[in-house]
């Protein structure tokens, strides 16, 4: 074994050790955060589900999936079909509670559109349309909110009424409360899911589907 081989081998081992150490640090940090969130929920259980929160599925279902989402979030758009499929697969056993985490520019207006749609009993079709057509209006740094309103109108929203409702104090209160809960629960990205009160980590669509299926089967 020559000197060059020894040096390369040492570098590889060093990189592997660094990666392993970083993984352990991230894992410990995640465990600390999970414990802190659990403690917060014990002290403030209403921070996860508020009376104003939109519910998809059966309101009294035994399994609750809470999703903190941003209507401008590309990952939320990617997860949306999977969440919808879970609701179709478990219509009586699962409810999905939506919470707003409007981190992107213009997302607060997206929330106002959705809440105005809820006032007209058009929440689901407008939600589906906004996420389906997200690339059309939610360009990061330069959102086309006029197009977002157009998409909502195409989904059946009465735009004249919604335009007057968008600044309704109740809608502003929903935004303010959800953002306060986002801060309390240390939500840093979307989508963030809680299943029966426990935060899901190491998230993927397949892992989400498996976790929900296991929770339903445990009932």
Image (cartoon, grey):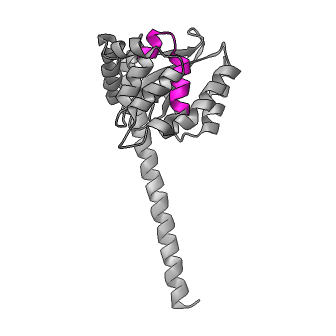
Above or below, 146 against 196 in this view is below
| 193 relative position to 205: left or right | left
Q: Quadrant of residue 175?
A: top left
- The answer to which of 28 and 90 lies nearer the viewer is 90
- The answer to which of 16 and 101 lies nearer the viewer is 101
Q: Residue at x 42, y 51 (%)?
A: 25
Magenta-colored stretch includes residue 196? no
Query: Residue 155: where, in percent of width, then height?
Result: 54, 21
Q: Residue at x 48, y 16 (%)?
A: 157
The image shows a total of numbered marks equal to 0
Residue lying furthest bottom: 2
Q: Residue at x 31, y 24 (%)?
A: 180
Query: Residue 132: where, in percent of width, then height?
Result: 56, 32
Q: Quadrant of residue 208?
A: top right
Magenta-colored stretch includes residue 120? yes
| 196 relative position to 170: left or right | right
On-image quarter of the C terminus: top right
Q: Quadrant of residue 159?
A: top left
Above or below, 26 against 121 in this view is below
Looking at the magenta stretch, what is its main secondary structure? helix
Above or below, 133 against 115 in this view is below
Report whether residue 155 is seen.
yes
- The answer to which of 217 and 68 lies nearer the viewer is 68
* Boundaries of the magenta span: 116-132
On-image quarter of the N terminus: bottom right
- The answer to which of 98 and 34 lies nearer the viewer is 98
Query: Residue 18: where, in percent of width, then height?
Result: 45, 63
Report whether residue 49 is seen.
no
């Amino acid at each position: 074994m020559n000197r060059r081989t020894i040096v390369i081998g040492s570098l590889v081992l060093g990189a592997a050790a660094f990666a392993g150490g970083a993984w352990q640090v991230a894992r410990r940090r995640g465990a600390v955060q999970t414990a802190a969130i659990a403690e917060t929920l014990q002290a403030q259980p209403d921070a996860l589900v508020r009376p104003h929160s939109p519910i998809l599925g059966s309101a009294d279902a035994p399994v609750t999936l809470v999703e903190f989402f941003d209507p401008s979030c590309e990952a939320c758009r990617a997860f949306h079909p999977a969440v919808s499929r879970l609701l179709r697969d478990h219509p009586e056993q699962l409810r999905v509670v939506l919470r707003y985490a409007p981190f992107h520019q213009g997302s607060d207006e997206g929330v106002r559109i959705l809440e105005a749609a809820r006032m007209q009993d058009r929440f689901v079709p407008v939600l589906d349309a906004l996420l389906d057509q997200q690339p059309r209006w939610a360009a990061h740094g330069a959102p086309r909110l006029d197009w977002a309103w157009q998409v909502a109108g195409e989904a059946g929203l009465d735009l004249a009424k919604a335009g007057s409702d968008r600044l309704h104090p109740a809608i502003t209160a929903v935004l303010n409360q959800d953002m306060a809960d986002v801060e309390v629960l240390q939500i840093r990205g979307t989508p963030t899911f809680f299943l029966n009160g426990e935060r899901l980590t190491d998230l993927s669509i397949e892992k989400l589907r498996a976790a929900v299926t296991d929770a339903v089967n445990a009932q």
